[in-house]
Every structure is written in structure tokens, then in C-alpha cells.
Image (cartoon, rainbow, N blue to C red):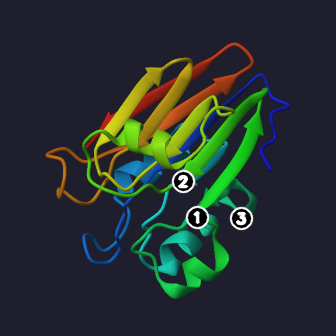
Amino acid sequence: MIDDSKDEILIGLIADTHIPSRCAEIPKIIIDDFLDKSVDYVFHLGDFTEYRVYEGLQDIFGKDKVIGIRGNMDDSKINAELPDRLELTAYGYNILLLHGWGGPNMVIRRLKKHVDLKKYHIILFGHIHKPLTEKVENQYFINPGTPTDKKFTDLNSYGFLTLSKEKIKPEIRYL
């Protein structure tokens, strides 16, 4: 699913957009940043809320370039089409995409309790609305935060993930 034949890939990370309840659309600054940087993929980590958000990303970036999972607030069409978890591989790294659950505290501990994460190098998740990039025991836990809501955070955010055979580089951008 991920073409890692290039020396390096750049992934745009977004989660918890909650369109239209929190915002009418994904902030233009994010779409422009993804386009300006020519992201290879866009990963949405759940809570699009409406299917049209997923379709809109596909219209902009291409169907094969938008990879998404469903969250706990997504509509029935997203729930029918997208998985709740997705395993990917790139450059030999095992990557897990999932939305998450529970409150914003002790999230890594909760993820480890509910999911066997031993085989993954990179765990990408949403749900808590707080940006996080943390390396724990040779695993990267990355949450881009939310670009539209301030329920669990004072700052809105999104992210990037650069991957190559030699590098795992997460980056959070604040709005």
C-alpha cells in the first residue's frame, strides 16, 4: 500500500477534524502546507465525522494517496468503508494506525494495555486531541493532535512524518 521505492517519503498527518461540528472544512493552511511540501501520502487517524471530508482529501491528493481509519465519531459510511486499525510497512518499519480511546492522560500506557504493540516501530493515533511525539523503548508514538477542536488542548495542530531506511522523523505543526 505504501510505495517506499523512493529514498524518502513524506506523510501528512491529520486527525480529529470533526467536520462540520467543529469547523466547516479542514483549515486551508494545512492543505496548502501538504501541497507545498508535495506529501507522498496523507494519513487521517479518524474522526473525519462526515464522509465528504475523506472524499475531499482524495479529490485533492488522489485516492491511492489518502489512507484513513475510522474514529469513534465517524458517520456510518466511513464506518462501513474504513477499518478501525490498519497495519502498513515502509522501509522495513511496521506501522500501526488506530484512532484510540479514553482520556488524554497515560495514553501510551493505555495503548500498550489494549493492543499488542511489540511488532510495531511506529504507532500513529488520534482521539486525545493533543499532539504527541514520543519515543518509548524504540517505538515512536505519534499523534498529530486536532486542527479544529480545543476540547483537550489549547493549540490546534497537524503533523508530518518523514521516513527513509535511515530515518523516522515526526514533526508537529501548530496553527
Find the distance from the CA under tag 2 to the CA under tag 3. Answer: 20 Å
Find the distance from the CA under tag 2 to the CA under tag 1. Answer: 6 Å
In this orientation, which residue lies closer to the viewer: 23 or 60? 23
In this orientation, which residue lies closer to the viewer: 42 or 47? 47
Q: State the quadrant of the C terminus.
A: top left
Q: In the orientation shown, which residue stands out farthest toward the left?
A: 154
**Total labels drawn:** 3
Q: Tell me if residue 57 comes above or below residue 3 in the rendering.
A: below
Badge 2 local density, few (<14 within 10 Å), some, or many (20+)? many
Identify residue for label 2. 98
User: Picture quarter containing residue 173?
Assistant: top left
**Disc number for residue 63:** 3
Q: In the orientation shown, which residue stands out farthest toward the front?
A: 113
Q: Tell me if residue 37 comes above or below residue 45 in the rendering.
A: above
Badge 3 local density, few (<14 within 10 Å), some, or many (20+)? some
Q: In the structure shown, which secondary structural element does the residue marked by tag 2 occupy?
A: strand
Q: Tell me if residue 153 comes above or below residue 109 in the rendering.
A: below
Labels 2 and 1: the sequence-earlier one: 1
**Disc number for residue 6:** none
Q: Point out residue 154 in the picture as x, y percentages from the top left corner.
A: 13, 46
Q: Point out residue 58 in the picture as x, y percentages from the top left corner.
A: 63, 66
Tell me the amino acid under the disc marked 3: Lys
What's the residue at 37%, 63% (across, down)? 17
**Disc number for residue 84:** 1
What's the residue at 26%, 47% (across, down)? 104
Q: Are marks 2 and 1 in contact (CB under 8 Å)?
A: yes
Q: In the structure shown, which secondary structural element does the residue marked by tag 3 occupy?
A: helix
Q: Are marks 1 and 3 in contact (CB under 8 Å)?
A: no
